[in-house]
Amino acid sequence: MHKNLYPFERWMRAQRLSENTIKTYLDLVSKFLGYLDRHSVTDITPKWVSRFNYDFIVAQDYSISYQNQCISAIKKYVQFRGVLLSLDALQRPRKPQKLPCVLSVDELSLLLDCTQNLKHKALLSLLYSAGLRIGEALRLLPTDIDSKRMLIFVRDAKGKKDRYTLLSERFLVLLRGYYKAYRPKHYLFEGQQGVAYSATSARKILLKSKARAGIRKPIVLHTLRHSFATHLLESGTDIRYIQELLGHSSPKTTMIYTHVSSKSLQKIKNPFDSL
């Protein structure tokens, strides 16, 4: 990390940014300052931000998401430095609107059946049955499971918002068996030495189960959350409730599932059938 970034790190912590955001911004701003050093530049100007944007990101064909992260990181650093600098001309490229990959109910059942380890099956089942992001699931504490109200408390989720989501009766049976076998001390899902289970390990679990199940779709852990939302929509759940369960701040984000719902599409009569 660039030597001048420790005050920036402390400032971001005081701003209560998430640990992932702090880590990402430090890495990107360090690269930006290193770029300025190599060109013997001492002042941050729109010209040099634009040159960094092209030389480091565009020319090396980094993703649009990565480019947007770089722009956000530099803007945050400029704010920290108190530099009067307008970066409005530096436009954020739009990400392509790709539809999420969704598993059918049968595919999900097969995937979980092929997950043999009890802890692994409980974790993947949780992601689907509650529609959680992997980070949300790995931060859960046993006390966040409210079996009396059949709800799961999700704390400090994206956007620093708390929310409740569903606790499945069938999952609760699986969870109790897992808890009795593993007795986690702090987090609901723990790795070695009682630390939170890692997202990397969870991804490996999914890939192994996917291979055993013979699923060829390009799925990731977030696919389970997408599938939860889509299946709720197909079962007739109002999209406003789905928005609340997922923790989306805007209904526009949730509306994407109307484009992947097979039942919505199946209701449309194909004009070819009228010939």
Image (cartoon, grey):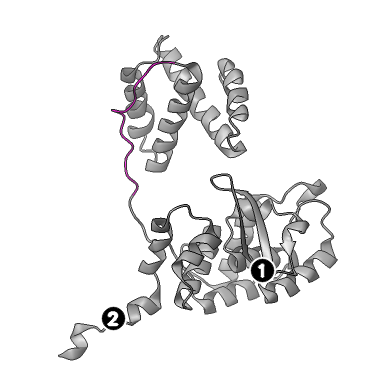
Quadrant of the rendering where the C terminus is positioned: bottom left
| Residue 167: mark | 1
Is 160 on the left-hand or right-hand side of 178?
left
Name which residue type carries label 1: Leu
- The image position of residue 221, as x and y in percent, is 56, 59
Q: Which residue is at a point 59% across and 77% down the rendered structure image?
A: 109
Question: For residue 15, what is the image quadrant?
Answer: top right
Looking at this view, name the residue that lies furthest to the left.
Answer: 275
Q: CA distance from mark 2 to mark 1?
A: 33 Å
Q: Secondary structure at mark 2?
A: loop
The answer to whether residue 116 of the structure is visible from this angle is yes
Magenta-span inclusion, residue 89:
yes
Instruction: Tell me which numbered mark, 2 or 1, is placed earlier along the sequence.
Output: 1
Is 38 on the left-hand or right-hand side of 275?
right
Magenta-span inclusion, residue 258:
no
The answer to whether residue 220 of the structure is visible from this angle is no
Name which residue type carries label 2: Ile
- The image position of residue 52, as x and y in percent, is 37, 24
The image shows residue 165, relative to residue 8, as above or below, that is: below
Q: Main secondary structure of the magenta part?
A: loop
Is 54 on the left-hand or right-hand side of 104?
left
Task: Name the residue tied to disc 2.
Answer: 268
- The image position of residue 163, as x and y in percent, is 60, 56
| Count of residue discs | 2
